[in-house]
Image (cartoon, grey):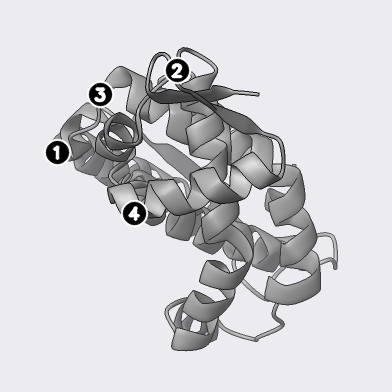
Amino acid sequence: MCSGRVDMAHVFRAFSKGADGVFLGACHLNECNYITHGNYHALTMVNICRKIMEHIGLNPERLRIQFMSGAEASLFAESVNDFVKKVKELGPLGKSEGMDEHGLKAKLEAVTELIPYIRLVERERLRVSFKSEEEYHTFFTSDEFKRLFNELIVDKLAVGQIVALLRERPLSTGKMAEMLGLTPSEVSRHMNTSSRHGLVRYDVSQKCYALA
């Protein structure tokens, strides 16, 4: 299967099912067997996923893409063994990053539900056409990409995490901030916006927010 067929939904589904790391093997860049350069699409997808992971507090080293040919069995074995060693050093997903079970679940649910939107903005605003892995790395670590990521994804991701938490039970602003690693003022801003959109309501009797 072409690595370009691997979707970010596959990556985050693996993490949601308890995987501590995800490894993606792809053909060498500029050596696409299908003349579609799917390996470049895979590289874009991995870079966006790693940025999302970093943003929600997961170590992006838990996701790796390695370029190799079908004839490079030794490289495949070495790459997988090295990745397994790295993941073991990182430890269990979420727990090693200081997240509790509910916080991790809310973050992954929010990402999963936002994937259709992320696919759209990736095609329209984040898809680039470079000729080397170095150029992709330069773009995805640039201030321009950070600006686009903040503009297009960050707020929607935060609201998604909050909604995922509120599905389980009503929560105060302070508790949501603690569980998501946000400041109370950030949560309050998202609550005000979500209230105007009819997503949440403030329960006066419990002094906390609930889904509308």
Where disc 1 sits, the SS reads helix
Q: Residue at x 36, y 20 (%)?
A: 102
Identified by mark 3, the residue type is Asp
- Residue 38 x %, y %: 74, 61
As drawn, the label of residue 185 is 4
Q: Residue at x 38, y 54 (%)?
A: 186
Residue extending farthest left: 89
Which of discs 3 and 1 lies nearer the camera? The answer is 3
Q: Earlier in the sequence, mark 2 or mark 4?
A: 2
104 over 50 or under it: above or below: above
| Residue 56 visible (yes or no) | yes
Q: Earlier in the sequence, mark 3 or mark 2?
A: 3
In three-dimensional space, the C-alpha distance between marks 2 and 4, rounded to whole angstroms, equals 18 Å
Identified by mark 2, the residue type is Pro
Which of discs 4 and 3 lies nearer the camera? The answer is 4
- Residue receiving disc 3: 100
- Residue receiving disc 1: 89
74 over 47 or under it: above or below: above
The C terminus - image quarter = top right
